[in-house]
Amino acid sequence: MIIRNFYDEKLAQASYLVGCGATGEAIVVDPLRDIEPYLAMAAAQNLRITAVTETHIHADFLSGSRELSAATGATMYLSDEGDDLWKYAFADDPKAVLMKDGFVIQVGNLSLKAIHTPGHTPEHMSFLLTDHPAGEIPHSLFTGDFIFVGDVGRPDLLERAANFEGTMVLGAKTLFESLRKMADLPDSLLIWPAHGAGSACGKSLGGSPVSSLGYERKTNWAFQIADQDQFVEAVLSGQPEPPFYFKEMKRLNKVGPAVLGHLPLVLETTSPGAILVDVRAGKTVRGNYFRGSLVIPGGMGITNWAGWLLKYDEPITLIADSQEEANQAARDMATIGLDVVSGWIKPTNLDPSGFTSFEQTTFQELDGSEIVLDVRGINEWRSFHQEGSKHIPLGYLRDRLAELPRDRKIAVHCASGGRSPIAVSLLKQAGFEKVVEIPSGIAALAK
């Protein structure tokens, strides 16, 4: 038996290749849209990808199941649990097989048993892996967004991100019952979740790529609560803000993502489009900002903030320093279905008179006349904030601009300078002229 973990740091997302060395067959669980890593690993291990599955209709990335099936001929195994709102629209694909609770996927001498584990979503499945030549004790459980290391999947996304009112309390109760289904499984069972620390699909995810059911029973807060009402209150409290794009991801993954054949390569242009997105590093943009552009630096946060702030039907031109930087940004956006990059342009090909620098300051230099704008998340704010500051999480800033005065200086900060350039550019886009950045962030104040 072969298990390989693939982890995307920007999405905090894990997918898996499981292969049978004896027969050369393999299955991929929860693939991303960029399928090249799975194809390369399968080739390196002398495996053929014959099956692909996903634990649920994902909200935080665009699924690669259709892409991988088109490239390899693999059978797609899709959940047929949940109500009609959460059925796959492409279930009639000749390569698709629908699964109910207890369905078994055979991969050579291995089997993956589908266990219906709703709560995070109504159709959610976990997959119990057994290596039959080694024995009949289950080896692993691929838990998707059901059980994480140190946490469980949040049951409020259907209501808070997709506007299905009245679903989060019901989802929490269902999640409580799904955890009870684990009672008869052995402590030795390895737990392979779909997300790690930094994902918005939970509130306290651990950083380890794998755990065991026994360890989670002893340390995961969700297993310590025996009362359903207490569990519901606990799981719904303290959840981070769900990004706006989660709703669109649910829709696209339900109807079926378009099959691209390959991720996009971006063509350089000397004629910028109407919407400019600067993906250069924040430290670069601070001294070389092009007026009217939206800053979303490439790196760890690009998928999250692109999903929050860009529209799925408006073509954009990237400002980048190189073809490689532009391609990487376009690839990152494509992982959440933002196939909107029409081209990229070097800063040297833009009007030199359009560039300016961010005005900067520190907390110590403020004189009290400014509006101090904190763009961190709600849990960060609750943990510590500057007294008297205005709190608007970055993802909601564009929709709440009316709360900010245009006749006073606005001093913007985040935790340590990663998000504040985005906020400054957004305010400048909206016509705010008296904007300064506190690039050190509140981390410097907290020391």
Image (cartoon, grey):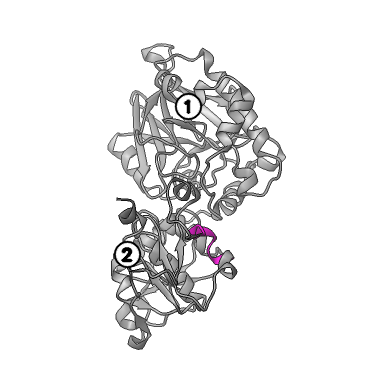
Q: Position of residue 372 (x, y in %)?
A: 45, 65
Location of residue 420 (image quadrant): bottom left
Q: What count of labels does the image hold?
A: 2
Q: What residue is at 47 percent from the left and 52 percent from the top? A: 377
Quadrant that contains the N terminus? top left
Is 392 part of what is drawn in magenta?
A: yes
The quadrant in which residue 318 appears is bottom left
**Is residue 369 at least partly visible in the picture?**
yes
Q: Describe the element under mark 2 as helix, strand or loop.
A: helix
Counting from the top left corner in percent of width and height, residue 264 is at 41, 62
Residue at position x 63%, y 49% in the image? 162
In magenta, the rendered stretch is: 391-399
Q: Nearer the viewer, residue 53 or 162?
A: 162
On the image, numbered disc 2 is attached to which residue? 364
283 vs 145: above or below: below
Mark 2 belongs to which amino acid? Gln
Q: Is residue 235 left or right of residue 220?
A: right
Residue assigned mark 1? 221
Residue type pointed to by label 1: Trp
Identity of the residue drawn at 71% across and 39% down: 84
Residue 109 in view, yes or no: no
The x, y position of residue 88, in whole percent, is 63, 42
> Where is residue 340 drawn, in percent x and y?
49, 66
The Cα atoms of the two marked residues, 2 and 1, are separated by 40 Å
